[in-house]
Amino acid sequence: MPDTLESVDSTSSLIHARGLTKRFGELTAVDEIDFDVAPGESFGFLGPNGAGKTSTMRMIGCVSPATAGTLRILGQDPAADGPKIRARLGVVPQQDTLDTELTVRENLLIYGRYFGLSRTEVARRADELLDFAQLTERANDQVEHLSGGLKRRLTIGRSLINEPDLLLLDEPTTGLDPQARHLLWDRLYRLKQRGVTLVLTTHYMDEAEQLCDRLVVMDKAKIVAEGSPRDLIERYSTREVTELRFKPGVQETLDGQLEGLAERVERLPDRILLYADDGEAAVAAAHARGLEPETVLVRRSSLEDVFLRLTGRSLVD
Amino acid sequence: MAVLARTYSGIGRVFEHRFLVYRRTFRASLFSSFLTPALFLTAMGLGIGGYVDRGGANEALGGVPYIAFLAPGLLVSAAMQTASFEATFPIMAGLVWNRIYHAMYATPITPPEIALGNILWFGARLLLISTVFTVVIVLFGAAISPWIVLAIPVAALTGLAFATPIAAFSATQRTPDRFAAIFRFGITPLFLFSGTFYPVESLPAVVQPLAWITPLYHGVALARGLSLGTVGTSALPPALAFLHLAVLIGFIVVGSLLTIRTVSAKLVRG
């Protein structure tokens, strides 16, 4: 198991999971995973679709019982104290669950009422959250007419109505255009600055790198690595990566000509990746062997490379 | 005790949500609640009734004008139809389309509270439309007895006797494809064959028992007894009136338990 796990004091952690397992009949969606989330931390689950991230989030959200293992949320047992725990969570689900028949403001008001807040209190908080989500001008618009990005912002605003101790975000920016994503990241970053504990799932490495202090990489229902984005890149990849693309048909003829060009060589269907701390040196080595790539790109290693190394597959399909 | 108080307030919040949504369409909905009975009572009660009553008081109808016989039947049938609609599409919307029940479940509200809050809402909505319908009946002079006031809760109970099992079924569905079958093979035939327009005794003897096992027949018989003032007479002895009531309550209890079960299963599954 990852060595940094023990550095988190399990008695003070907001989420404590050991051997956490979820099965649906024959299918094991989450297979004996261990992790802890400390107060104030931004913690991520990175992995492709179907890795078990959403099933894990639903168990943390106390809406889906664990099949086996230990799970403590805010020091309590979800099986016994689900409603009590949920009262202190904020949830941004993968699929929007807004009431499209109601207005933006009404969505905030009624959601606050679900937590048992008084009407005056929810009205006060709704105004603040409209401001935070930059939706004040759209307050009286019916949700049905909002764009995807605005709906996500409303969902995030709504998740804060009970001033949660722990905010759960399942694929918060999936399906959004780049501009809407950046706006959302900015809002989440502000929450992180305020000390809100964030737990998020994503299959976007840039999202994980921007928002997570620490993350676990999930693949096929298991955790395959754990650490900060920088840790993981240092541990599982080189400083730089050189991407070589060849004319169609050429890549297949290169057998035996790539070995030793870099610390590690990966062949993807459409390109070749050379892992070396000095990318330019790898390019020079390739040219010295008479290789003639059509395009060459030297870049820094990312979590995508970590994932490729750990699983032999790409993160995004 | 604390758990009970919490549950009570959870149901109340689910109800509050339905009320908030309903408020947006309140006027249009109330207007049609007035219009529909007025149209039916005019067309069938006065129009067809004019022919039915031409030969003088009809013994099979209990010796009252056709419109007086028909009105409580229509009242209860309308409750059944509204209830059936409320228990199909809105339930599917909450669980599958806009998933607002999943949003509720992410808060301290529990799945049984979501199921019961909706059932409470069905009851309130049914009481409202049945009250409006009854006012229209009285305005048409089609109520014989002041006991018709009690036909309002009877209509609401009949509606719930349909709404609860149908909601339980709706919660198991991923698409609305099978809802049409409920209306086509369930609600519409019942509307026609459960004693709304003529006494069930007019039907062939073999099909009569089919009417007895449905809540509509019992609701119509009880509401009609109240509206005509025949409860306690030989037309509707007290024991029979209680049997009608017991059947309705039986359907509601079983239907509510099933709804709690299927709604919870769906929400936990995700």
Image: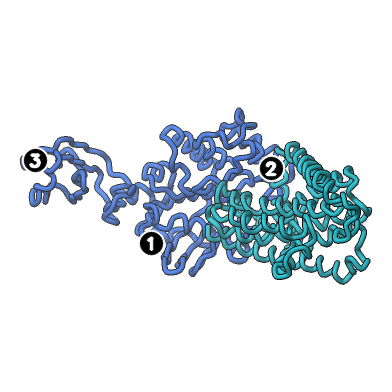
Chain colours: A blue, B cyan
The Cα–Cα distance between marks 1 and 3, rounded to whole angstroms, is: 39 Å
| Viewer-closest of B169 and A21 | B169
The residue where tag 3 is placed is A291
Pair 2/1: label in front:
2
Task: Where is residue A102? Give x, y as percent.
Answer: 64, 39
The Cα–Cα distance between marks 2 and 1, rounded to whole angstroms, is: 43 Å
Residue type, mark 2 in image:
Val
Which of the image's four quarters has the N terminus of chain A?
bottom left
Q: Specify which label sits upstream in the sequence, 1 or 3.
A: 1
| Viewer-closest of B139 and B260 | B139
Q: Which numbered marker is on residue A222?
A: 1
Q: Chain of mark 1?
A: A
Q: Chain of mark 2?
A: B
Task: Where is residue A164? Give x, y as percent.
Answer: 60, 48
Please check whether the numbered discs 2 and 1 fall on a single chain: no
The residue where tag 2 is placed is B21
Residue type, mark 3 in image:
Leu
Give the image quarter of residue A77.
Answer: bottom right
Give the structural element (helix, strand or loop) at label 1: strand
Position of residue A150 in the picture relative to residue B187 (left or right): left
> What is the crowding at mark 3: few (fewer than 14 residues within 10 Å), some, or many (at least 20)?
some
Can residue A231 be seen in the rendering of this structure?
A: yes
Asked whether the beta carbons under mark 1 and mark 3 sit within 8 Å of each other, the answer is: no
